Amino acid sequence: MTDWTARWQHTWQALDSPTPPEPVLDALLARYREPQRHYHTLQHLTECFTAFDLLRSQSSHPGEIELALWYHDAVYDPQRHDNEALSAALAVDRLYEAGAAATVIERVHDLIMATQSHEAGDDPDRAIMLDVDLAILGAAPARFADYERQIRAEYAHVPDDAYRTGRARVLAGFAARDPLYRTALFHARYERQAKRNMQHA
């Protein structure tokens, strides 16, 4: 079980910033418990932090990546197309309130927005952020199947035929990436399984 308070405090310590008042964390956790969520929940957040801990030592700005992970799905409505922008805006607001430097705010905003296009460019921290977010694609088959069910539940408003077509397009796009994972560790650990999972799906 994740100790959310300890993790939250650790994040802000890594940013060398004062930890926001407790209601800020409570409000953020409440977002991940919203009823329309089935995959983008606290389970996903836990899995992201577990994955990030494997790559933390390779990051240039670990606190910024960690805060970006906290907020990258803070806003999640399957029927919207601006979730990432709204999530990034929330993170920016919290960082401003904490008195964070402009460079920190800009990098956190950029890391969250990267989860919209899933393009890392030449930024190693972006590569880490995206590998963490996509680690689920390389999960063990049983967890991947559960993930697929969770995503389908979030898109319950989409008819079956349209969903299958759209989902196949998304997975095919990821499967066509070579490599899918940009960090050496995740490429070695998850690449082959991810390609198997997506082909099976």
Image (cartoon, rainbow, N blue to C red):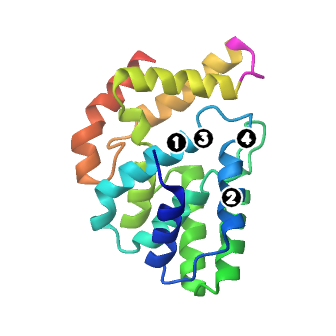
Point out which mark residue 41 bears: 3
Point out which mark residue 34 bears: 4
Question: Disc 4 to disc 1, how far (Cα)?
Answer: 13 Å
Residue 119 point in image, percent of width and height: 48, 54
On-image quarter of the N terminus: top left
Neighbour class for label 2 at 10 Å: few (<14), some, many (≥20)? few
User: Which residues lie in the magenta part?
Assistant: 156-160
Question: Disc 4 to disc 2, how far (Cα)?
Answer: 13 Å
Q: Nearer the viewer, residue 141 or 116?
A: 141
Amino acid under disc 2:
Asp
Q: Nearer the viewer, mark 2 or mark 3?
A: 2
Circle 2 residue: 26
Name the N-terminal-most of marks 4 and 3.
Answer: 4
Residue 191 point in image, percent of width and height: 29, 37
Helix, strand or loop at mark 2: helix
Viewed as shown, does residue 173 lie left or right of 128?
right
Circle 1 residue: 44
Question: Disc 4 to disc 3, how far (Cα)?
Answer: 8 Å
Residue 3 point in image, percent of width and height: 48, 55
Question: Disc 2 to disc 3, how far (Cα)?
Answer: 14 Å
**Is 102 colored magenta in this rendering?**
no
The overriding secondary structure of the stretch rendered in magenta is loop
Amino acid under disc 1:
His
